[in-house]
Image: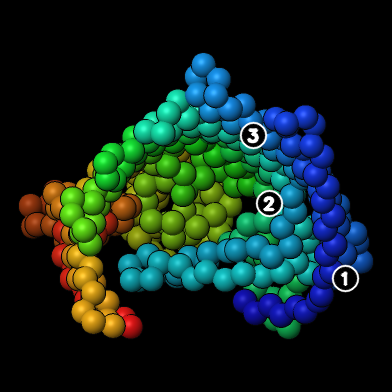
Amino acid sequence: MIHESTGWRAALFAENKIHLGQNTVIEAGLRTTWLAARKSLYAEPRLAVRMDWLKTPAGDVSLFLASGLYRQFVSQFDISSRSPRTFVSSTRFWMGNDSSVKPPKAAHFAAELLVTPNQNWTTSAETFYKHQYHILSVDYSASNPEVLSSLQQSEFLKSSSGYSYGFAGTIQRMLNPGSVKVRFDHTITQRKISDLFGNRTLSVPWSEPFRLELATDIVPAKGVILLMRWRGSWGRSWGYRKAYYDFLSAHLNDVDSLLEELRENGVSADAINRIKRQITNYDLTSPDSHTLPPIYQLDLSGSYSIRIGKYALQLRADIINVLNRDNTAEWRFELDEESYFGNGSGSTTGLLERSDRHLLPRILSVAARLTW
């Protein structure tokens, strides 16, 4: 499909800071945006409060609260490739709103508590909630009109809604010299897209519900820096390549309708039965049930910097995935001729085999940089 639109928008932002005593600062703001394509004025109020207490029995304490209404006038979209086997699985682009769709709208709330008991320790706790009243997503079931130049965004974008919430905790210890940091994140993001997956509210494909990160920075000698990063991720769903789900969403996840269309297009009964069994066997209409295995990855890097007259030389080495773990990025289907066509004995499942697409293996890189 081809779409082209032009338009302009103008924005005005006002902000005011109010100091209440020595510990509290209130920031109130308002952004107003005129969107010429819709001939409409949109207001986005924001409010934030920060409170600081020094030298309390727990140390220095800071509390930050913020809330606001946000609209998105330029949206990012990823279009899946026609072939799920292609190296580049999707194409990303950005697009401003035309007159046929409303700008996405969301309300945010965030809070952060920072406690510094002394100069060596820092702890923080964060939480947030985001309610997405209206989000735009690609409609793969949209028809392809003959006059492409007249295509409006409402003809290939769907309205969806959802919410997201989570919390995170961080503990950091300063070393002499260097630091050690531990961070844990838990985030839940749910979305409902009209007419898809039975109008159920599901997790989003990019969600990582649980993340744990360990980081160490050490300076053992002058000019030498050693870095260590370890991360773990759990709870990812939508395990198959996105193109498989998008293929079904082009038929509004109605398997019977998909099979009927294939019959009308002259696809053989055997091929139709194979497709039906593939969808049913792997439960492709229930992406929330496709939970991927955890990710564990350790990365190391080190650098050495010296002065050579008026020049500065830095030598650096990085090792990605030190333990060479086979971390699974997603699942995809591959043809196993024996199980798909049979081996002459008459035994065949008629199904494509599920296989793993892995993230990066162990990679070593070295670099040198000379500056003056």
Query: Residue at label 2?
Result: 135
Q: Is residue 258 above or below residue 54?
A: below
Which residue is the extreme one toward the front?
309
Query: Residue at label 3?
Result: 64
Residue in front for this viewpoint, 22 or 112: 22
Q: Number of labelled discs?
A: 3
Q: Amino acid at mark 2?
A: Ile
Judging from the image, what secondary structure is the residue with disc 3 in?
Answer: strand
Image disc number at residue 36: 1
Q: Relative to 26, is 285 on the left or the right?
A: left
Residue 348 visible in rendering: no
**Quarter of the picture holding the C terminus:** bottom left
| Picture quadrant where residue 282 is located | top left
Q: Residue at x 68, y 51 (%)?
A: 135
Residue 81 visible in rendering: yes
Q: Relative to 107, is 365 on the left or the right?
A: left
Q: Is residue 301 above or below residue 209?
A: below
Q: Residues within 10 Å of mark 1 (few under 14, many from 20)?
A: some
Q: Amino acid at mark 3?
A: Phe
Residue in front for this viewpoint, 224 or 28: 224
Q: Residue at x 79, y 37 (%)?
A: 19
